[in-house]
Amino acid sequence: MPLIKLTKLEKTYYTGGVETPVLCQVSFSIEKGEFVAIMGPSGSGKSTLLHILGFLDRHTAGEYRFDGKTIDDLSPDEIAHVRNQKMGFVFQSFNLLPRTSVLDNIKLPLLYSDIPEKKWTTLASAAAKAVGLSHRLNFQPAQLSGGEKQRVAIARALINKPEVIFADEPTGNLDTKTSEQIMQLFQNLNEEKHTIVLITHEPDIAKHARRILYIRDGQLAKDEKIS
Ligand code: ADP
Ligand code: MG
């Protein structure tokens, strides 16, 4: 059973009486353990697609199955639970809490988990170690470089050992060298069996993935396996 299965998925925004079709008849599957890049020009619907995949938004037609279940069969509580327990998110703008330590930023998803609080520091320290940030645990975001901020966001995404990490242009605010390091980190995580779905519009970034889905005008234009 694929982890992600889209069948003729559609998304249309309805805003102020205006209909904006964004995704049209998108069908593909992603297996556990894959590293998939989603590429396409600005405005092609990549972020919309990722938001739907991450249960942050709803499609308007077609079907989305995550781990065999459609979102339509889940209650709001179950949706929140799946999102928190099985999905990790990394965004271009890092989305870290200011004036909050690296350790506490990484702990955030644990607030909504069943894991007892006395284990949080150990877990967050281990996640920080996994991204090479053990020496920065008590720093605040303002004291970190862009690359370090993104490492914190990745550690936070990893803390609940999610089935999949969704990343939307994670290197969009980083210089070339730092971007390479962050992509190396995603590659290492993938080698440790994490499923990764990562949006980018840069071919140099996409080449770290093992498969590239090209989105053009809201449609799947090409599905390319990289050997
Ligand atoms: P990408 O991430 O590929 O740049 P997006 O998914 O962000 O593209 O946007 C795709 C299209 O959907 C754009 O034309 C954008 O204007 C439109 N869009 C995105 N969000 C909304 C919204 N909330 N309401 C209306 N249109 C939207
Ligand atoms: Mg986008």
Image: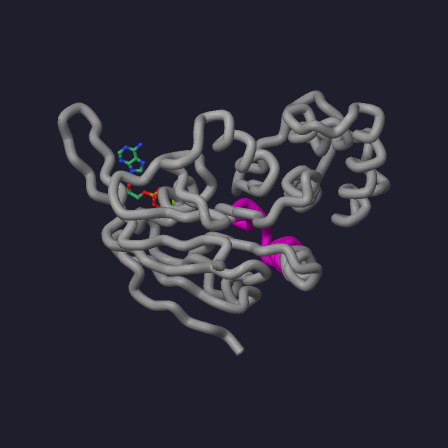
Q: Nearer the viewer, residue 194 or 154?
A: 194
Does the rendering let one see residue 142?
no
Q: Residue at x 63, y 55 (%)?
A: 194
Q: Nearer the viewer, residue 103 or 3?
A: 3
Q: Nearer the viewer, residue 31 or 11?
A: 31
The residue lying furthest to the bottom in this view is: 227
Does the rendering let one see residue 30?
yes
* Ligand 1 found in image quarter: top left
User: What is the x, y in percent for residue 159?
Assistant: 70, 39
Q: How is the image coloured?
A: one colour
Range covered by the magenta-colored residues: 170-184
Q: Nearer the viewer, residue 175 or 46?
A: 46
Q: Which secondary structure class fits the magenta region best?
A: helix
User: What is the x, y in percent for residue 58?
Assistant: 35, 36
Q: Is residue 24 above or below residue 14?
A: below
Q: Residue at x 59, y 52 (%)?
A: 175
Q: Residue at x 30, y 51 (%)?
A: 44
Magenta span has 176?
yes
Q: Residue at x 56, y 50 (%)?
A: 171
The residue lying furthest to the top in this view is: 99
**In the picture provided, is 55 more to the left or to the right than 119?**
left
User: What is the x, y in percent for residue 85?
Assistant: 61, 37
